[in-house]
Image: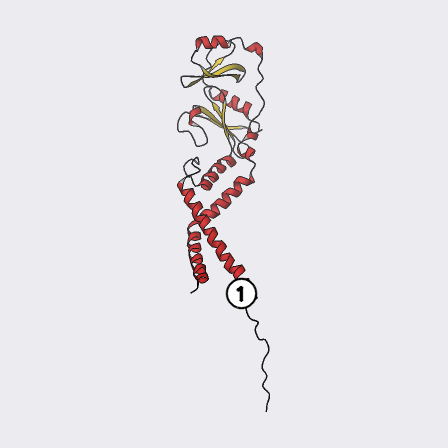
Amino acid sequence: MNKSMRLLKTSRKYHKWLMAFIGLQFIIWSVTGAYMVFFDIDYIHGDTLVNNEQDKIDPQQVTYSLQSLLQHYPQAKAITLGRYLDKVVYRFTLAEQKLAIDASSGAVMPPLDKAQAVKAARFYYSGTGTVESAELITENAPFELNPAVMPAWRVNFTDFGAPAIYVSAETGLLVGKRHSFWRLFDWMFRFHVMDYDDGADIDNSLLFWFTLFGMLASILGMVLAYFRVFRKTDEALTAPAGNDSHTVGVAP
């Protein structure tokens, strides 16, 4: 057996077994990649779910000065000024606790109840659907919610895609938004990068080895294609022409 035939036989053997091993993952990469490319990333991230208007603050409502706030809360960090339903409030972090205080009186705002959470979610939500349910999440945060923002209210709406708006129970801020297509995108991404936990480890060893085996299978496939196409063409061009004439016997 010459070198070319040995190469062909070896390539066919290992290409077959490699594709039998990683072929399903190739299909998964194709399907998940097509899904992630098909949808606009801004839609997937839920940018269309919320109003992007900036808070309009009436300076007349800010009678409690920043200097007064710092006198009462000298350890306050990340201070911002914004709306809290129909009030203007200061929001800040104090000893890892998030607080909101009235910018007109300096009073600490109580945590949102269900009615206030629904009102806040409707303020943020850009759709026309009605509120289906509201749930206070204090522990065991779902994958789509950052545990650092708990406690938070999840307000579900009846629109297409089952949208949900997350509002901080402490500060009234919008802390999350999701719809079904984004949730499915999260799962697609996990299967695409082969991190079946939270999808954060995109350079995991499983992905590395499957990628390596996939590249090897592709190289072997190109070798087979060469023998299938180019070598076959070369042999056809260099083969001696056949004798198509028939010898006819002549009777003596």
Q: Quadrant of residue 146?
A: top left
36 and 211: which is toward the camera: 211
Residue type pointed to by label 1: Glu
207 and 81: which is toward the camera: 207
117 and 198: which is toward the camera: 198
Farthest residue to the bottom: give it.
252
Image position, residue 240 (x, y; %): 55, 71
Image position, residue 4 (x, y; %): 46, 61
Image position, residue 92 (x, y; %): 46, 16
Q: Is residue 23 visible?
A: no
- Examine the rendered structure and indicate whether residue 60 appears above or below residue 135: above
User: For this view, does 37 lie left or right of residue 202?
Assistant: right
User: For this view, does 220 lie left or right of residue 252?
Assistant: left
Query: Element under label 1?
Result: helix
Q: Quadrant for the C terminus, please.
A: bottom right
Q: Which residue is mark 1?
A: 235
Q: Across the whole image, how many numbered discs are drawn on residues?
A: 1
- Which residue is depicted at the point 43% across and 46% down? 212
Q: Quadrant for the N terminus, please.
A: bottom left
- Which residue is depicted at the point 48% across and 13% down? 101
Scheme of colours in the image: secondary structure
- Which residue is depicted at the point 48% across and 54% down? 221
Q: Is residue 205 visible?
A: yes
The 10 Å Cα crowd at callout 1, few under 14, some 14 to 19, many 20 or more, is: few
Q: Quadrant of residue 57?
A: top right
Image position, residue 39 (x, y; %): 55, 38
